Amino acid sequence: MALTSKRAERDGGIPGLGDRPAYGHAAMVLVGVQTHVRFRFGPWHYGFVIIESMNEAMRPLRLLAQPFVESGSLDPRMQAEVVEGLTIRDGCLLFVSQLHNIRHSSVTSLGGPTGFEGYINKLPLDQLIDGADRSASWLAFVGTSEWAARCLAQGMMLGRGIASAAADLGSKPVDVWISVDYGPDEEYPSAAFRFVTYRADDLWAGDLAAFEQPVFRMTSQLDHRDG
């Protein structure tokens, strides 16, 4: 079952940016099911704290993903999403590349700005990571722990790039959600990325522990200590 919420049920999902300015280094501490990461993003050195949280099912994958994250290599199709950029429409922060998904949807029809952003800003990580194709060797790789860790790592690096791009637009902090579905009930394994503007009174989803599949969340916050 894919990541769902009261909004997702209405769905029809930095380092590594090549020669762009460095998106900082992190001081990272694993505490229980949460990881707190301090980053400096972007050419103007915005001070951010990236707060990571996850359910129990995601914890082993988070550890497996760390070497891929440390490599700092964002796959080309992920990088293209950041390079193409973000835009703000009707108060909503959106991927430029996904504006075609608006069609006849609206903020009102999707229950508000958070639901609208979550619908538009969804990407299939499993289809965008390097090597994804229909070859026998790739299909055998899909659904393994290493495959899931690679999807998570790419989503994390993409999320950090999105936080920086949002800051460039003067936008509010973002909430990134990454889920992995190993394909029970004969469904094909998949991994999804989505982001929304962080709104304390209008979250995309609630209790992480309520999800059976691995779910990961990254929330950016201004680090006021950095002056």
Image (cartoon, rainbow, N blue to C red):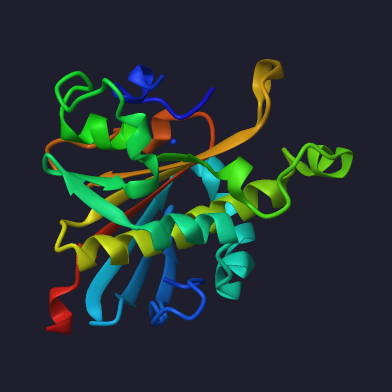
In the image, what residue occupies the spot 48% across and 81% down? 19
Locate the C terminus and report the quarter of the image it occupies: bottom left
Residue 176 image point, x, y percent: 35, 48
In the image, what residue occupies the spot 43% across and 47% down? 54
In the image, what residue occupies the spot 62% across and 41% down? 127
**181 horizontally vs 197: left or right:** right
Residue 207, can we see it? no
Residue 59 image point, x, y percent: 54, 50
Residue 81, can we see it? yes
Residue 207 image point, x, y percent: 32, 34
Check the image and report above or below for 32 versus 226.
above
**185 horizontally vs 102: left or right:** right
Check the image and report above or below for 196 versus 150.
above
Locate the N terminus and report the quarter of the image it occupies: top right
Judging depth in this view, the residue of 158 and 80 nearest the camera is: 80
In the image, what residue occupies the spot 51% across and 26% down? 2
**Splitting the image into 4 quarters, where does residue 150 fall?**
bottom right
**Splitting the image into 4 quarters, where does residue 42 fall?**
bottom left
Residue 35 image point, x, y percent: 40, 61
Judging depth in this view, the residue of 224 and 88 nearest the camera is: 88
